[in-house]
Amino acid sequence: MRQVVLDTETTGLEVELQHRVIEIGCVELVNRRLTGRVLHRYLNPERDIDAGAQEVHGITRAQLQNEPKFADIALEFLDFIADAELVIHNAPFDVAFLNAELKRLALPQRPIGDVCRVLDTLALARQMHPGQRNNLDALCKRYAVDNTHREFHGALLDARILAEVYLAMTGGQAMLTLGSGAEGAGEAARAAEALQRRRGAARRLQIVLATDAELAAHEHALDLLDKASGGKTVWLRS
């Protein structure tokens, strides 16, 4: 199975306000292993970047002046993702921006959903961990994935991190080594062993004892229930 873990950075959050893609990062997985193939492009958006977005990714318009436009790399991008399952965190956001870019091309292009299957890891995380924070940083902490070098969001960096998080979420096979032969097998085994240790630590049950105030409140609630039942509560029977 071929998958492409994808992330983008944009000039702002609202695709309806003509915000544009300024960075695309893709890493390839085949049978749940990194192949070493990546696609990484910075793009000239031909418009200003919102201050809030720039605080997130740290990319300025001046840095993008000499970069290609999306139209210049569109065919390369479509060829890279063709027939793959896209793995994206908060997929509707990235897919909407990519579809908007495709609509701007002179030639008609099918939307991303017609070209690839799309797996939204945010929706998956919400199913697995309801009621908890499920952004990428929270998932890194939950699955013990190192993201200490993530000072700013970056499409390729975030795609690499998401690949490791996704593998941990869906079975723990995060043998991301590209080695071959005995050396590669040894590295893979060590990576698997380290991952299992990290996952075990992350999932170890944490016991939180009630405080004295909480115990007193609990006893008070039990007394009220006992009075309401006329002294017939089963937990007070000897």
Image (tube, grey):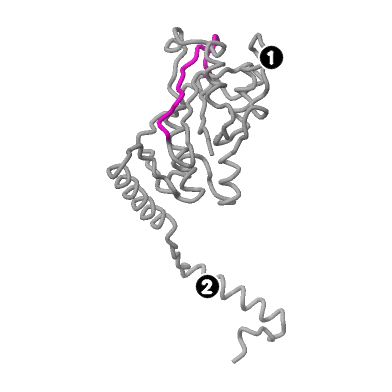
Q: Is residue 206 left or right of residue 84?
A: left
The relative height of residue 6 versus residue 23 in the rendered view (above or below) is below
Sequence-wise, the earlier of marks 1 and 2 is 1
Foreground of the two, 80 or 235: 80
State the residue at coordinates (34%, 53%). 193
Q: Looking at the image, which residue is at 42% across and 60% down?
A: 204
Name the amino acid, label 2. Ala
Q: Which residues are magenta?
A: 35-50
Which residue lies under the disc numbered 2?
216
Residue in the image at 46% along x and 10% along y? 67
Local crowd at mark 2 within 10 Å, few (<14), some, or many (≥20)? few
Q: Is residue 36 magenta?
A: yes
* Amino acid beneath label 1: Pro
> Spatial distance from mark 1 to mark 2, Cα to Cα?
69 Å
| Quadrant housing the C terminus | bottom right
- Report the residue marked by disc 1: 108
Q: x%, y% of residue 154?
A: 44, 27
Nearer to me, 207 or 227: 207
Q: Please indicate whether residue 232 sits to the left or right of residue 44 in the image.
A: right
Query: For the view shown, which residue lies furthest in the front direction?
Result: 181
* Magenta span includes 73: no
Q: Quadrant of the N terminus?
A: top right
Q: Secondary structure at mark 1?
A: loop
Please rate how many residues cluster around mark 1, counting C-alpha atoms within 10 Å: few if below 14, some from 14 to 19, many from 20: few
Closer to the camera in the image, 76 or 165: 76
